[in-house]
Image: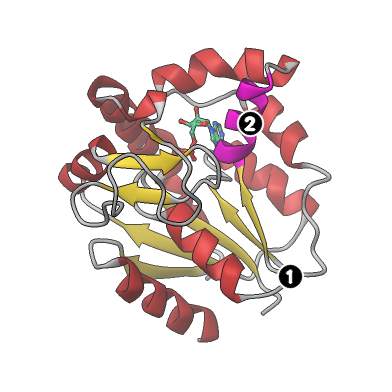
Amino acid sequence: MRKRIILLGAPGAGKGTQAKLLAANNNGLAHLSTGDILRDEVTRDTELGRKAKGYMNRGDLVPDELIIDMIEGRLDEDGGFILDGFPRTVTQAEALEKITAIDVVINIALTRDEVIRRLSSRRVCRDCGKIYNLLYNSPKNEGVCDACGGNLFQREDDRRDVIENRYDVYIDVTAPLINFYKERGLVKDVDGSQATEKVSDQILVALRG
Ligand code: AMP
């Protein structure tokens, strides 16, 4: 599959989990997560990381110019790609249109209550990035990744007050992208409240259609 795909959805809707699965099952399909790239910049204490850190810890968006500069040059259209967490504002979507065409936008829908419930129980492997949820997808051994044995941690921005801000930011500035892409006839809606495998199946159906 060589499609150019955007995954839209609130924080915690499952974009990262689904993007990883899609990329793993489709050779050459690149997974680009702006959140992962930014967290890596923060860990490496780069200039971009230092600029981005405060916004991220508060659950605010990193300014558009920084994000657009960061994404340019990373989009390899030949093998297709999955964008996870980008674009997040209309300005970013307009900039993206100048860089590349998009084939399909998968909108993973989830309610506010479910977003809060999921994010507060999310854990991530420090080594391989695998995502767990203590409510319905916990690791076999507490705090240890099933896949690679790495340590699991809770993201800084998965604390209750930050989660609420992230959701509000999503509603105010990211959710308008659903209409932006509906006007372009690109959106396929998927119910994100289902189990991971069911959501994956729906995404595959949407991608084939
Ligand atoms: P995520 O892992 O996608 O939830 O992103 C974590 C944080 O990184 C967000 O809360 C923002 O602070 C920042 N971030 C990630 N992607 C973007 C983006 N496209 N535009 C602005 N900020 C972003």
Residue 94, position as x, y percentages in the image: 66, 45
Name the residue that disc number 1 marks: 28
In this figure, which residue is indicated by the disc labeled 2?
40
Is residue 84 rendered to the left or right of residue 112? right
Of the image marks 1 and 2, the number of the one nearer the N terminus: 1
Task: Give the structural element (helix, strand or loop) at label 2.
Answer: helix
Label 1 SS: loop
Q: Quadrant of residue 92?
A: top right
Q: Quadrant of the N terminus?
A: bottom right
- Residue 116 falls in which quadrant of the image? top left
Q: Residue at x 55, y 37 (%)?
A: 35
- Residue 178 in view: no
The residue type indicated by label 2 comes to: Asp
> Where residue 11 appears, x then y in whole percent?
37, 42
Q: Residue at coordinates 38% horizontally, 37% vertically from top-left? A: 170
Q: Residues within 10 Å of mark 2 (few under 14, many from 20)?
A: few
- Give the vertical position of 54 relative to 182 (above or below): above
The spot of residue 52 in percent (x, y) is 60, 19
Q: Most prominent secondary structure in the magenta stretch? A: helix
Q: Nearer the viewer, residue 124 or 102?
A: 124
Read off the magenta span: 34-44
Q: Does any atom of ligand 1 lie closer than 8 Å to the CB of label 2?
A: no
Q: CA distance from mark 1 to mark 2?
A: 22 Å
